[in-house]
Amino acid sequence: MEDRSPESVPLVAGPADVSSEEALPEPPAPRLNQTRTGIKPKALPEAEADLADPSLYFNRELSHLQFNMRVLEQALDESHPLLNRLMFLLIFSSNLDEFFEIRVAGLKHRVALGDDSTGIDGRSPQSVLGEISQIAHEQIERQYRILNEALLPALEERGLRFRRRSDWTEAQCAWVRDYFDEEIMPVISPIGLDPSHPFPRLVNKSLNFIVQLEGKDAFGREGGLAILPAPRSLPRVIALPAELCEEGFNEAVFLSSMIHAHAEELFPGMRVRGCYQFRLTRNADMTVDPEEVSDLASALRGELLARRYGSGVRLEVVDTCPDELADFLLREFALSEQDLYRVNGPVNLTRMMALLGDLDRPELFYRPFSPGLPKNFKKEGSLFDAIAAGDILLHHPFQAFSPVEELLAEAARDPSVLAIKQTLYRTGADSPIVTSLVEAARGGKEVTVVIELRARFDEADNLALASRLQEAGAIVIYGVMAYKTHAKMMHIVRREKGRLRYYVHLGTGNYHSKTARLYTDYSLLTADEALCEDVHQVFQQLSGMGRARHIETLLHAPFTLHEGMVAMIDREAEHARRGRRAHLIIKCNSLTEPKLIQALYRASRAGVECDLIIRGMCCLRPGIPGVSENIRVRSIIGRFLEHTRVFYFQNHGKAEVWASSADFMSRNMFHRVETCFPLRDRKLAARVRKDLETYLVDNCQSWRLQPDGSYVKQTPGDAAPISAQETLLYAYAAKA
């Protein structure tokens, strides 16, 4: 602080010397009549809140955990078939694995770097990690309680039993011994721990055992500790032969129980004092520096190998594991007590999903359905003719994804088709889409495919797809180095009557036939000249170089999408300020981008009715007086994964409906190539609005976000129960 002599200090403070906040007296409160007598004053306007105030935002990681808790709740919902309830419990495990691999790993990395910066919510990485640990411990304990006390007994009542070691019959013990000798013993590799055998590098999320030994081995070494990595090639749950099962039961045993029962055979002449399951979750985030990479494909191949051995972020151990062994493992993996999770059951529940695919118990799963087709869709004749006659909108999974695949297959065979351009993000190893692209390339058509190699956990599949397409003669582009290509676009050039005509597919979901039966998404098939030309320009921009292209009708990230969304929200707010009825509906997977949240706050203040259907993360805080009292946030969790990104703006009677590949997140708006397309056909736009309104009346699978960040499940009460997903299924499917 600067020293000042007494002579330099003014005797009287002038206006320039005084802070208006600190030195000026507060103006007296107006003395207004509040009695029932006489005239009533108008209500004083509330001081506007600072929209950047951290108290107006939820932390994204904690919001993400809230979503996973809603998924876990489905395991208790008896409206779901029993095996689907088990599936939800396993999905919770899978989701949590990824949460620790990516989100927790990222926070730990920031702490290690000394990065204490805060996000829009004002929370430091350290404080968020502490709360994550508390919530995750509670929810994982709850997960195993649901498994052991609710699901396993219910499954047993329906003739499905998981046999514990203590319950094996004599015949089952003999069969397990034979299985161990023939299938496990030849491939398992016990690792003793001593100065010449240091602690091994264990693969991410692999099942392992720590074994306490007594006695001397063949080399005279005293017993101590050993590690048993379970063979990754073997299933984690093994069905027992029918003749060994109790009558009326399908029975299975865990691989971990088999290894535990015969661990001593792996250490002949020694006694096993204890054998305990554990699993390490590692940092699986991949970092490829655009500035230092000359060949993205080669760089990713190297990163894929490194991912298996990233730094530890979570240690799971069976709850019977002694403290000294758990502490030993924590030290080995450089983890703290808050990273330790004790579980009452198998540590690798996610691997149980494989069993569900093998069970022939259709009565314990959702009833299968046949996806429908639009009324104007003709099975006979060319798909090009059908699309030329008018836009076709498909709502998956209620309506089939097959028209998209069939359009590409027809294009691959059609001699009039000259060129095909396609984006691929997640598509599946045996995709009909890729088969058609290969056929088209081999047939001499100009095929250009933009493959996003960095689609998380699909990198290896996408590298293989790229090689397959290149071998067929297709031009393969890996997008733009600093931006993931997440847009879902197909562009077909066809010669018709002596001129070139474009056909386009735009979607909100991936070109993946399997997920198209599980995720809700929209597909637009169109020959609209303006839309088709815009898609052509976006592809040109991706494959070539130069300044941003002029795009007429589409919004696209990272250029115009964010600005366009903010502008449409602000437009709705302006309608409200002019006394007009104003309404918007936003449906997407996540809402975390600050400027979009602030635009929604401004809209709420202006009087816009804002209905938000946000499946997962939501950083916006609804129901705050003077800020967000006109905002309602719902999350729909049900049979299908809600994945559509669609936006409705009332716009003073000139309603607009947009669909997009992008969520309301910073990464989508500024760090990815995304598209957002208008539904220019009024009938299709009206149909989507009705779909959205159906979600707004759901009182069975809808959760309302509260001002404190919790979610409350909506119940019918005295009203008739309504499930949006079931309603859409019966509305659009051919056979529900």
Image (spheres, helix red, strand yellow):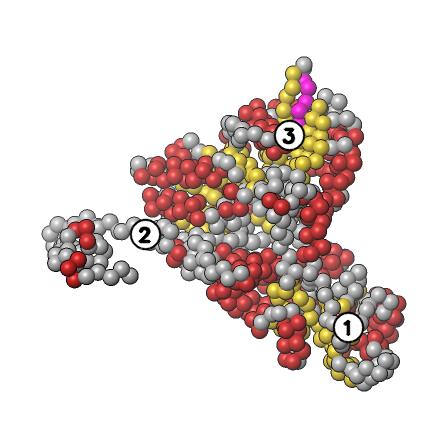
Which residue is tagged 2? Answer: 49
Which residue is tagged 3? Answer: 491
Residue 421 found in image quarter: top right
In this picture, residue 144 sits left or right of residue 253: left
Q: Tell me: residue 602, above or below residue 196.
A: above
Return the x and y of residue 538 as percentages of the image width and height.
58, 31
Find the distance from the CA under tag 2 to the CA under tag 1.
62 Å
- How crowded pointer 3 is (Cα within 10 Å; few <14, some 14-19, many 20+) is rated as many
Asked if residue 525 shows in the view, the reply is no
**Is residue 493 covered in magenta?**
yes
Residue span colored magenta: 491-496
Return the x and y of residue 393 as percentages of the image width and height.
59, 34
Q: Nearer the viewer, residue 317 or 109?
A: 109
Kindly state the secondary structure of the residue where label 3 is placed: strand
In this picture, residue 604 sits left or right of residue 212: left
Which residue is tagged 1? Answer: 197
Q: Of tags 2 and 1, which is closer to the observer?
A: 1
Of mark 2 and mark 1, the one earlier in the sequence is 2
Find the distance from the CA under tag 2 to the CA under tag 3.
47 Å
Q: Amino acid at mark 1?
A: His
Residue at left offset 47%, top offset 40%: 562
Residue at left offset 81%, top offset 69%: 189
Q: Are marks 1 and 3 in contact (CB under 8 Å)?
A: no
Q: Nearer the viewer, residue 423 or 514?
A: 423
Q: Amino acid at mark 2?
A: Ala
